[in-house]
Image (cartoon, rainbow, N blue to C red):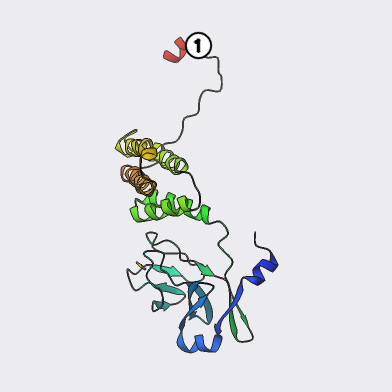
Amino acid sequence: MTSTSERSQSLLRAASLAELQEKGQLLVHLNHQTITLFYSRERVYAIDNRCPHMGFPLHGSVCQDGIVTCPWHYARFDLASGGTFDSWADDVRSFPVQIRNGEIWIDLAPRVNPKAHQQQRLQDGLEQGISLVIAKAVIALLDLGLASMELFQTGLAFGTRYNKAGWDTGLTMPTCLMNLLPYLEESDRPHALYQGLSAVARDSAGASPHFRVHPLPTTNLDFPTLKA
Ligand code: FES
């Protein structure tokens, strides 16, 4: 949790409100981050200038009624939250804004839980079968220190819950790749994990979940009864 003093340290002046009102959008550089400011519906919004889809700039996007549309592949984002309407693109990071004496201040405090965000993105990628989302989540989670085994287990849990045909190629492939992982160059491991998880997603696309059948409440059942 960010304390009040840490929060005030992360607050930086970005631009004058009058200039933003005149131009509609502005590009600012703060602490090695490039941020686009938008003025829409008489409110100020600040988002990361990199589109989360492929990293192209969002400055110059069309902005209407608090929604911005990236000019490159037309992903749409809610400016207030940064949430995307197109899940293949991911949410863009939005920054809290304060107006003080006609000046715009932006809070650059880091994201509260980047690991939880990327784990959710991996889950989204598996559920919707979007290989680009899976690839980006794998790389981000490994960078955040998650072990390869945890990523594999996510795929395994997903595949056994949703796989239409039981144990199939989609579960065999990540298992083989996981066994191969120690023999691969370190730089090739994310690619292997990505291929395995994409195979799980391909096999399970559109499938309904299997619900687990719980064991009988007693442990002393005799074998002939079970067999019968
Ligand atoms: S780079 Fe923005 S939608 Fe593709």
Ligand 1, seen in the image, is in the quarter at bottom left
Element type at mark 1: loop
Residue 217: x and y, percent?
Answer: 56, 23
Identify the residue shown where x is 50% and y is 25%. Answer: 215
Question: Against 121, is 66 above or below?
Answer: below
Q: Amino acid at mark 1?
A: Asp
Return the residue nearer the eye: 180 or 157.
Answer: 180
Question: Against 29, is 215 above or below?
Answer: above
**Outermost residue toward the top?**
224
Return the residue nearer the eye: 143 or 47.
Answer: 143
Residue 165: x and y, percent?
Answer: 31, 35
Which corner quadrant holds the N terminus? Answer: bottom right
Which corner quadrant holds the C terminus? Answer: top left
Return the residue nearer the eye: 179 or 89.
Answer: 179
Residue 22: x and y, percent?
Answer: 48, 89
Residue with the mark numbered 1: 222
Q: Is residue 13 left or right of residue 65?
A: right
Question: Against 56, is 22 above or below?
Answer: below
Return the residue nearer the eye: 140 or 53.
Answer: 140
* Tally of marks: 1
Residue 50: x and y, percent?
Answer: 42, 69
Identify the residue shown where x is 51% and y is 74%. Answer: 46
Identify the residue shown where x is 51% and y is 69%. Answer: 94
Packing grade of label 1 (10 A; few <14, some 14-19, many >=20) is: few
Q: Quadrant of residue 175?
A: top left
